[in-house]
Every structure is written in C-alpha cells, then in structure tokens.
Image (tube, rainbow, N blue to C red):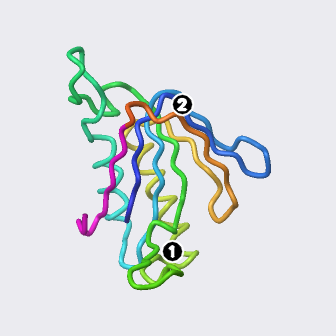
C-alpha cells in the first residue's frame, strides 16, 4: 500500500457536487492498494498512520499521534499513487491492484482505522472525486508498505 498523509485543519471530499466525507482536524489520507497487498498490509498501514507522531505537543514539537489528539481521518482511494512514469510520459499502473482487490483492501483499511478507535470519513471508490483540504503546517508524509521510500 502507498499513502500520502496530510495533517489538516479540515478536509472534505465531493462526488457529483455532494459531500461524501468531511472532517475537522486530523489527517487526509490518499491510499492506494498494490497488487501484492493483503488484509494484514491494510491493518499495518492503518496502525502506522494512527501512530505517526506528526501533531504538535505543548512545546510545538511533533510528538503527538492522531490518537493522542483525537483527530479524524478522511480516507480517499487513489490508485494513481502507483503510477510509474520513469522513462515515459504516460504512467503505468501495473503495480496497482485491480478494482475488486483494491476496493476490498481499501474497505479493510477503513475498517482497521475504525477498529483503532478513529472517526473515519471516506470518498467513494472508483468515483471521480474533488478533495478540498487545508494542510496544517504544511505536513505531508509519504508511506509505502514495501518501504521503497
């Protein structure tokens, strides 16, 4: 799995002009499922994200996690995180999971976040979405379950 994690003061996702998910302070997470991912990968990624210490403590240092600040997550599926444009102009998405596997593991990821006690809002899988957010910091973290970066 790959994720772009952004600390936000607010975020929302719209499908056909209708808000399908909206949060206040927390994390906007763009999440992509890879071909070799499993339910265990989804659970591990969820745990990693909620435990990331990227929220400020009383001294202004990034020492608090999403759990510590009781923030929410806006989870949006984005298979294009697996786009490989090395040596070409049109990205290849061969490493991204197919739609059926992608949807199942995206839903596993969302459920894993909820199991960890996090309030989660979502987009709509395979829909054309508009994401609006205010990046707080700005703070943006890239995660890859294969640790390629």
Q: Which residues are magenta?
A: 139-149
Question: Label 2 belongs to which residue?
Answer: 10
- What residue appears at the point 51 percent right and 49 percent down from the top-left corner? 75
Q: Quadrant of residue 1?
A: bottom left
Residue that extends furthest to the top in the rendered view of this protein: 58
Image: 141 above or below 149: above
Question: Label 1 belongs to which residue?
Answer: 101
Other residues around mark 1 within 10 Å, as few (<14) / some (14–19) / many (≥20): some
x and y, in percent, of residue 81 in the image: 45, 66
Image: 17 above or below 78: above
- What residue appears at the point 53 percent right and 62 percent down from the top-left corner? 78
- What residue appears at the point 33 percent right and 32 percent down from the top-left corner? 67
Asked if residue 96 is among those painted magenta in the image, a careful observer would answer no
Asked if residue 144 is among those painted magenta in the image, a careful observer would answer yes
x and y, in percent, of residue 14 in the image: 70, 46
x and y, in percent, of residue 103 in the image: 55, 67
């Amino acid at each position: 799995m790959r994720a772009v994690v952004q600390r936000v003061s607010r975020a929302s996702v719209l499908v056909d002009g209708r808000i399908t998910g909206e949060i206040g302070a927390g994390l906007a997470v763009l999440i992509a499922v890879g071909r070799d991912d499993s339910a265990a990968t989804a659970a591990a990624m969820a745990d990693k994200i909620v435990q990331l210490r990227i929220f400020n403590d009383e001294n202004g240092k990034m020492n608090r996690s999403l759990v510590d600040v009781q923030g929410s997550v806006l989870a949006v599926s984005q298979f294009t995180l697996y786009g490989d444009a090395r040596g070409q102009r049109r990205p290849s998405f061969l490493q991204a999971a197919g739609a059926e596997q992608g949807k199942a593991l995206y839903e596993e990821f969302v459920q894993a976040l909820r199991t960890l006690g996090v309030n989660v809002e979502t987009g709509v899988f395979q829909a054309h979405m508009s994401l609006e957010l205010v990046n707080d910091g700005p703070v943006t973290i890239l995660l890859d379950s294969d640790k390629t970066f």
